[in-house]
Image (cartoon, coloured by chain):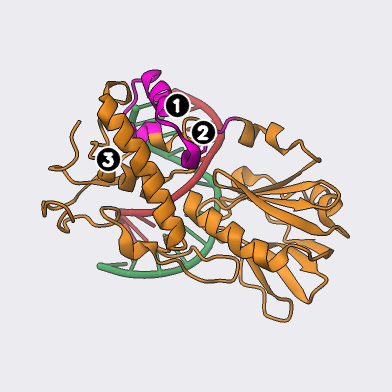
Chain colours: A orange, B green, C red
Amino acid sequence: MPELPEVETLRRSLARRVVGARVIGVWTSGLPLRLQRPVPARALRRASLDRRIVAIRRVAKYLLVDTDAGDVIVIHLGMTGRVLAAAAATPRPPHTHVVWTLDDGRELRFVDPRRFGWITAARPGKEAELPELRVLGAEPLSLTVERLAALLARTRRAMKAFLMDQGNIAGLGNIYVSEALFLAGIHPAARADRLSAGAVARLRDAIVQVLRGAIANRGTTLRDYVDGAGRRGRNQFRLHVYGREELPCPRCGTPIRRVVDSGRSTFFCPACQKR
DNA sequence: CCGGGCCTGCGG
DNA sequence: CCGCAGGCCCGG
């Protein structure tokens, strides 16, 4: 579910709520998450028990929780993952898989019905060496036109696939790829290495604009996404093409089209977006 | 590159 | 009942 803007919104909401709190208990459900991998309960406990939370960071779609001993908890939300800071007295939602009890009467809860999420602990300063993080490409919010052009030049893939690949640019997902390609006027099937210089520049601007706008709107809540306080985003009311099959293109009125490749929907305007 | 799989839930 | 879902991995 969550792409970069949702994880960033979550990061900000959690930072205000749990930074400074001390972890006085760690509980895990015992159910495995992504790829049947068990939650590393011992490592999580060693990394966070009796430690203070000192910062919350984001890398692409990953949420990183820093502790005062330097250990880092690394969380990926998959499709339906949530991280909620809630009063310990409130009932834990169904599908709660990890709970950090805090010294201020609250709990930090990782909840994930589909269990496509992932969580681990890393030793101080070693989180960037995790295989999952090491393969990530450029941070899109600081992407330069030159860097984007270099990435595009080295592949012959379709633009949709290029932008979905976290090894190129890390943080876009199904929603924001459709949105960025629309804003840039680029067809999702266009070949990456055949964009004009003007199209590359438009794409960079479109990526930044789409992500910044979504963050300003506190993320897109289609169904599951909420921030650390359980609040929904409102960027779903600002989408141009995603989820808008058959509805008129906001620019030219042509009906938006939906195509499916590799099992994922892509939305675009057949008139505005050229190969 | 594609299809399938991992899971659960929801809406038509 | 079926199709679909914001992510990612794997095998062919």
Seen from this angle, which residue lies furthest bottom? A89
Quadrant of image for the C terminus of chain A: top left
Q: Position of residue A205 (x, y in %)?
A: 35, 40
- How many residues crowd mark 1 within 10 Å: few (<14), some (14–19), many (20+)? few
Kindly check if marks 1 and 3 are in contact, taking CB atoms under 8 A apart as contact: no
Q: Amino acid at mark 3?
A: Ala
Relative to A180, is A72 on the left or the right?
Answer: right
State the CA–CA distance, disc 1 to disc 3: 17 Å
Number of disc labels = 3
Seen from this angle, which residue lies furthest right? A50
Q: Amino acid at mark 2?
A: Ala
The circle on residue A184 is: 3
Kindly check if marks 3 and 2 are in contact, taking CB atoms under 8 A apart as contact: no
Q: Which residue appears at 65% of the width and 50% of the height?
A: A57
* Mark 3 belongs to chain: A
Kindly check if marks 2 and 1 are in contact, taking CB atoms under 8 A apart as contact: yes
Q: Looking at the picture, tell me which residue is in the foreground, A70 or A143.
A: A143
Q: Position of residue A223 (x, y in %)?
A: 42, 65
Bounds of the magenta span? A135-162
Q: Looking at the picture, tell me which residue is in the foreground, A123 or A41.
A: A123
State the CA–CA distance, disc 3 to disc 2: 19 Å
Give the image quarter of residue A102. bottom right
- How many residues crowd mark 3 within 10 Å: few (<14), some (14–19), many (20+)? many
Same chain for the residues at labels 3 and 2, yes or no? yes
Seen from this angle, which residue lies furthest top? A154
Residue underneath mark 1 = A147
